[in-house]
Image (spheres, rainbow, N blue to C red):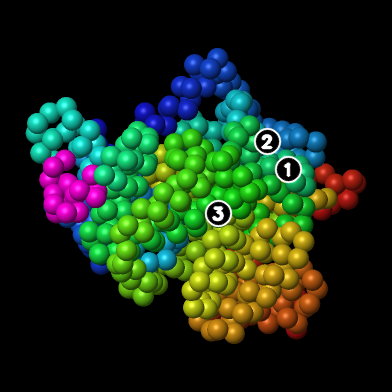
Amino acid sequence: MKNILAPLLVILLAGCAPAMVKVDSGSKTMGERMTLTLEGAWNQINARGLGPAQTWTMEGLPVDQLLIYTGIKNDQAIHDESKSGTKSFKFRSGMQPDEIVALYEGMLTRDRSSFTLVKLAPAPFGGGKGFRFEFTLTRRVDNVQLSGMGYGVVSEGELFALVYMAPRLTFFSRHQARVEEIARSALIKTGGKGI
Amino acid sequence: MMDREETRLRRSPFRMRDAALQDYVQGIACRLGADHCPDIRVYLVRTPLFNANMAPNGMMQVWTGLMLRVDNEAQLAAVLGHEIGHYLERHSVEGLRDAKSRAAFGSFMGMFGVVGAVGVLATLAGAFAYSRDHERRADNIGLLLMHKAGYDPAEASKVWENLLMELKAKLGGDPTRSPMFATHPPAAERKEMLMKFAERLPGGAKNDDAWQGRIKQYCREWLREEVSRGQHEESLALLTRKIAELAPQPDFLSARAEVYRLRAQEKDLDAAIADYQAAAVLGGEPPETHRGLGMIYRLRKQLPEARASFQRYLDLAPAAPDAAIIKNYVEELGT
């Protein structure tokens, strides 16, 4: 637990405490083109180093995370790039689902955690032909085994995705259905046409 | 604290639990450590990076990324010897402070016999006089341990040369930008020192075949982990070297193809197709070889080729995690 809390402690000591904002039930506009409908509240964490995804949690960041990507553009990294000396994982508009999943695998294993793809299948998302993936992640910092799932679609050359992960025991199953509902509610606007 | 860390490592899901491979690497460490063998406890750790380290309590971690990179037993011994050198050097530093540890340092020097010890002392003294840097000392001690254990010390500089090649690829030709160089001697100096010192200790075994045979069953898994790091330039440097040095192996060709496909810079897809096809011609290729070909053909609208490649992938790996999306592609491609 000490290891998990250490980065948060550093943030606090640096005078940039993460702000937690309640996200209420109802329809939410995410970025310029995506809307999500929530049943039940979430906590949104705002802190340096968490972009470009919006980061939501039910149990607190060391436990579970829902990453929401809206309109990631060609050549834009899917993670914060302020930490120098580390490889950036950047989205390209022409990427296929397996390449996008590989991008997330690279991002999630930058700290030497271990990622295993469990399933990758076509799935509607945001009103378009997207994909859904499941994975397990063994977190390096504390050896905790996480289960994860994600939805994604490329619309007008931009990436829209949801990625959720939580400890395999108890927490993932507790919130999985709620995340699936959010994914099903996603709607992406496209210049007057559907994607 | 170290014992608590070791307990954690022993239970870690990242630890490889292959008793035979574990005993084999422990055996190499023991040959190097000689009388210190009972103090050394090797743990193989599933991490696709070049690293090994040894804690003051004798816990030694050897990462799979290191095992993938070394070409033979002697090269692994060079790294393990370096780490044991750090361990022993701590004893020797303590030895300057108290009689008990002075005896331990004497015991280490005694490993090389009276005649050997004179040369060893001269060399070590030279190294100590030149620099107090721990890395340099560990390098020197590591070479001596290699020689004593019957390994060819000339392999040590090759490990460094190979690592340097990867760092250059990663950092656009300037390895001094690597954080590693903040704690390690300059590359050229280190390589030269290792080569020069190895010349004084000629001979010894490399054991290429023994090593390659031992790790063969893990190569596919380690290569997948290497590719999934997304460090394309480093991986290409590593895989190109391996492909040039080793007898043709479909796993290395397929892994390089996968890196080219994922990097997708100009001409990368052509290079990927060439490697995938070479792997398939050799036979025994990973199923992903055909998925990769299918992806490129689909992108290039070569529909019959894409369909055939995806079908071959599904035949070879019907339970693959991505089988559902590949089946969907096959359906989209039609008959």
Mark 3 packing: few (<14 Cα in 10 Å), some, or many (20+)? many
Q: Can residue B254 be seen by looking at this rendering?
A: yes
- Lateral position of residue B245 relative to residue B120, left or right: right
Q: Which residue is mark 1?
A: A76
Mark 2 packing: few (<14 Cα in 10 Å), some, or many (20+)? some
Q: Magenta segment, which residues?
A: B105-121
Image position, residue B126 (x, y; %): 32, 40
Chain letter of the residue beneath label 3 in the structure image: B
Verify whether residue B210 appears in magenta: no
Q: Can residue B317 be seen by looking at this rendering?
A: no
- Lateral position of residue A5 relative to residue A81, left or right: left
Question: Depth check: B211 or B206 in front?
Answer: B206
Q: Which residue is mark 2?
A: A52
Label 3: state its secondary structure.
helix
The residues bearing labels 2 and 1 have C-alpha atoms spaced at a distance of 9 Å
Q: Which residue is mark 3?
A: B166
What amino acid type should be assigned to the residue bearing mark 2? Pro
The residues bearing labels 3 and 1 have C-alpha atoms spaced at a distance of 26 Å
Both labels 3 and 2 in a single chain: no
Between discs 2 and 1, the one toward the N terminus: 2
What amino acid type should be assigned to the residue bearing mark 1? Gln
On the rendered image, what quadrant is the N terminus of chain A found in?
A: top left
Q: Nearer the observer, disc 2 or disc 1? A: 1
- Magenta span: chief secondary structure: helix
Tag 2–tag 1 contact (CB < 8 Å): yes
Image position, residue B207 (x, y; %): 33, 71
Label 2: state its secondary structure.
loop
